[in-house]
Structures are given as C-alpha cells and as structure tokens.
Amino acid sequence: MPNITPQDAIAELKSEFAFFDDWTDRYQYIIDMGKALPAFPADKQDDAHKFYGCQSQVWFDAEWQNNRLMLQGTSDAAIVKGLIALLFRVYGQQTADEILATTPDFLDDMGLKTHLSTNRATGLMGMIQKIQTLAAESKKTP
Amino acid sequence: MMDTPNTASTFDVEALRGQFPALQQTVNGKPLVYLDNAATTQKPLCVIDAVNQFYRLDNANIHRGVHALSARATEHYEAAREQIRHSLNAAAVEEIVFVRGTTEAINLVAASFGQRLKAGDEILISALEHHANIVPWHMLRERIGIVLKVIPVTDLGALDLSALPALITSRTRLVAVNHVSNALGTINPVQEICAQAHAHGVPVLVDGAQGLPHGLVDVQAMGCDFYAMSGHKAFGPSGVGALYARRPWLDELPPYQGGGDMIETVCFDAVRYAPPPAKFEAGTPNIEGAIGLKAALAWHAGLDWPSITAYEAQLLAAATAGLKEIPGLRIIGTAACKVPVVSFVIAGCHPHDIGTLLDAMGIAVRTGQHCAMPVLAQLGAPSGTVRASFAFYNNTDEVTALIRAVHRAHALLS
C-alpha cells in the first residue's frame, strides 16, 4: 500500500524534475526510473498484453488487490519504459476513486505531453486509458 | 549528389541559411539542427513572402473571373505551372497537373490509369517504395485483382536491376518506382528502368518526392511517362505538388475527380470535359500553395547546382564517416549513389529513444519506419531506424553536432 496519494506523487515527481535544468538530464532520470521497474513477466509479453504504438510497444497488466490497482508494465524503448515507471508512481496501488480523480494532465505540466500525443505513438496513451477504464469499471461492479 | 568531390566546395552555406527564418531558432535551449528534410524542408523568405503577398493583395479565385484580382491570381497560378514545367524540363506546360502532392499524384494515376486494368494485369513496383507508391496499387489489387510484383533490393539498399528483365512480362501494364528512396537515400537508376520498360512497351511512373529537392529533374532525359512531386519537400508550401504526365497519356486517361473547372459544358444528360491539364483539376485548387511553389522552384533553379551537389556529397560523407565510429551503429542503406540521407540503427538502443534524446539536444531527426516498412524489414531494421536527412542549408557544424549527440545518446542508453 503506498504511503502517498497520487497528488503527492505528482508533487514529488515535479520537484525531482525541477532539479534538472536540461532535458537530456531529465531523460536520463526517466531512463533510470525505467531500469528500476520490476521485470515484466516474460509469459505476459504477448499480443494480449500489448498496446501497439507506431514506434514503440507497451506491455501492461493490472489486477486489484484490496481495492488497490497493482500495475505491471514494460516497453521495448527505454524512455517509454521510464515513463511507464513514472506513471506507476502516480497510479500504482491507488484506489479506483483516486485513479479517476487523477487525469494525466500533470504530464503536460512536466513537459511530457508530447509522449502521449498520437504523433509519438508510443502506446502509452492506450495504457493510461486502460488504467482509467479499469478504475471506472470497478466502480460499476457491485 | 553522387560522388564524393575531391575539391573543397566554394558554396556559401551561411548566406543561404540566412534566407531561412525557421533555421534561426533554439529548441529545448539549443540551436535548432534541422535534419528532417526528407520529411519536409524549411521555407526560404521568398516563398513566405510570395504566399503572404498573395493573401495581402492578389487573393481571388482563378480561371474565368472577369475582375482584376482574379486575372492576377490566374496569371500567377499559371506562371507557377510554367515554373514547374521548367524545373522538371517537361516538353509542354499542359503536361503539368496540379495536385496536393506526390501521394495524390500517384493516386490520380492509380485511379485513372487503373480504369484500363483487368484482373491478372501486373504493376511492377520496387522493394524500396514509400507506402504512397504501394498502397494505391494494393487498393487496385483489392478492387480488380491486379497483380503486384516487386523489384528486389540488395543488402546495400540498391535496386537489383538484374531481376528486372524477368519481372517485365506480357502482363506488365506499368512500372512504378521512386527516384530516390525516402528511407535510405538511394538514388535509383530510373533512366535505365524507363529504357528497359519502354523496350517492352510498358510505361513508367516515377515517385519524385525525394528527387527534386536534391537537384534539377529532367523528365525528358529520364524518359518517364509520369513523374510525381511534392512542393513541401522542395522548399515550397505543403498541400501542393504536381503530376507530370506525357501529353498522350493526359488525352487518353479518364478524369480523376469531377467538379468545377474540369469541364467545358455540363447538362444533366452529358458532360464534356475540359482538355488537359484542367480535365484533372476539379475544384478550387491550392492557389497560394502553387504561387509559393513557383517562388520556391524559381529560387531553387537559380542555385549553383554543381557546387550544391558536391556540397551535399561532402555532408553525406562527413556524417557517414562520423556516425560509423559509434560502437554498435549500423548504417541502413549504403548504396553507391545516395542523396545526403543517413538511416541508422544502434545495437541495444531503440530508434525512438535516440530520436527523443536528440530532440532534447535540439536536433530534429525522424525515427521509425519512414512509411517504408518492407525495405526496413528486409534490411534488418524491423523497429525502424533513426534517419538524419540533410538539405544544402545544413552545415558541417550541424554534422558535428549530430555525431556528438548520437555519441551522447548512445552513452545514456547503454
């Protein structure tokens, strides 16, 4: 169970980002976050778990444990994998209410919005939509 | 464009760069190094001014207007057609049809020429084609059952012309190949392809999207039947381009789209089409685009081409030599004849990561499949490549910046 809310996680990420004055260094930080991401199970690295991107692929899985969403994911691209780790810090192990209350707008504030645009076509947007959908569906389930 | 020169060029790149406002900016706090010219080129002031001037003073619809502005707009628009004829060295101005760009030019031929085709007829393309010269023919295959045949490519990324004689059969109706590969930069021997195809009575379409930006094109010397080009790749505006077609084809082929401007008379029982090129130009066209393209091509034609060709070869040689030093880097496409395009992969580094890091360092390249999935799959780059594509306004400092940045990206990703 996380100690912090999504809003706290976002505030933490923003302050960490503010530490760097150069985008190359920020990407280095993002790449390192990706390297620290727990290994994605090899048997789940299949089409059923894939969000297709024009340039890079995302593999993703999620399950509810004690009403909190446990997330697993990876990518074939290092920066996308780092962004997955970043998103998991915000959405991972949170409740459906917290997830639904947290739109991905914070990526815009952090200058990372382009990574979700269709132009970049990373598969990341599909993953975020899936997280939001899972949260919304869990609210409907009695 | 072809050979590495032995002598230093006297070409004044800095004076030329001064004509391009977009090159004078910083990106992510770094001076912009724009190396995505195969996707689109930046525009010189004369093009920006021409489009601006049209909207400030000359804006009117063309053809048949009786008033002064319409006459002026028509005059400029038709002068643009003449400029394209000149730049392509077409025999007659009627052979130039305005279109949105290369993609529409090829779709026009596929739609109009396609009406002559029957199931089992063959279209011969090459393994180097952009999707724009694959998908329109695939759509004909779906619709009428034509057969798509492919000229193979060697491991260097050059067309294997030894395969050509066997691929041209009694059922071949058209050969459609690109002048220059967008993904690899290979310059294809289109004149030789035209000669071989014509020996069998088969017409040839050349996708010239990447050809014109790197030199003057001579469609008569090339011998092609159709040549497709885009304005935005040749320093002109987006959304305007041209199809060159030899006059007999324009008379023979049915119209492409129906509408105003492409007819002589219309009643509910019958329509009489206008003569070419109007027959293929339905509706109000991209007038300001054509006028901007005229400015671009007039400027382009006035450049010192022998020096530019030598200079572009220097850029290519310097970029190729510097990038090859990077551990694990492999250049995809090493044909003898290339425009200054370097497509590469680095073992263990995703092209998208390299492109993102280069952008952080102010360097604009393209990553991915470059709309040419088949050839990249064959050459062992199924996840795509990083493509640095140069124009003659790039300088050697930018080549150095690219090489340093790729070194740094490689270090960050290792």
Image (spheres, coloured by chain):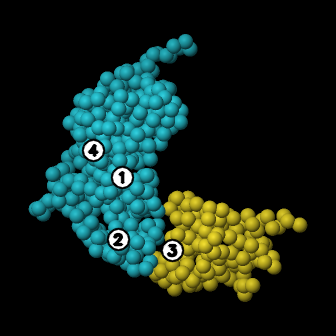
Chain colours: A yellow, B cyan
Asked whether disc 1 touches disc 3, contact meaning CB atoms under 8 Å apart, the reply is no
Query: Element under label 3?
Result: helix
Image coordinates for residue B251, horizontal then vertical, percent: 36, 21
State how far apart marks 1 and 3 are (Cα).
Answer: 27 Å
Q: Earlier in the sequence, mark 2 or mark 1?
A: 1
Q: Which residue is mark 4?
A: B162
The residue sitting at the bottom extreme is A3
Q: Chain of mark 3?
A: A
Q: Which residue is mark 3?
A: A78
Q: Which residue is mark 2?
A: B329
Mark 2 is surrounded, within 10 Å at the Cα level, by few (under 14), some (14 to 19) or many (20 or more) other residues, namely some
Mark 4 is surrounded, within 10 Å at the Cα level, by few (under 14), some (14 to 19) or many (20 or more) other residues, namely few
Query: Element under label 4?
Result: helix
State how far apart marks 1 and 4 are (Cα).
Answer: 22 Å
Please tell me whether residue B75 is drawn above or below residue B291 in the rendered image.
Answer: above
In this rendering, do the residues under marks 1 and 3 share a single chain?
Answer: no
Report the amino acid beneath label 3: Ala
Report the amino acid beneath label 2: Leu
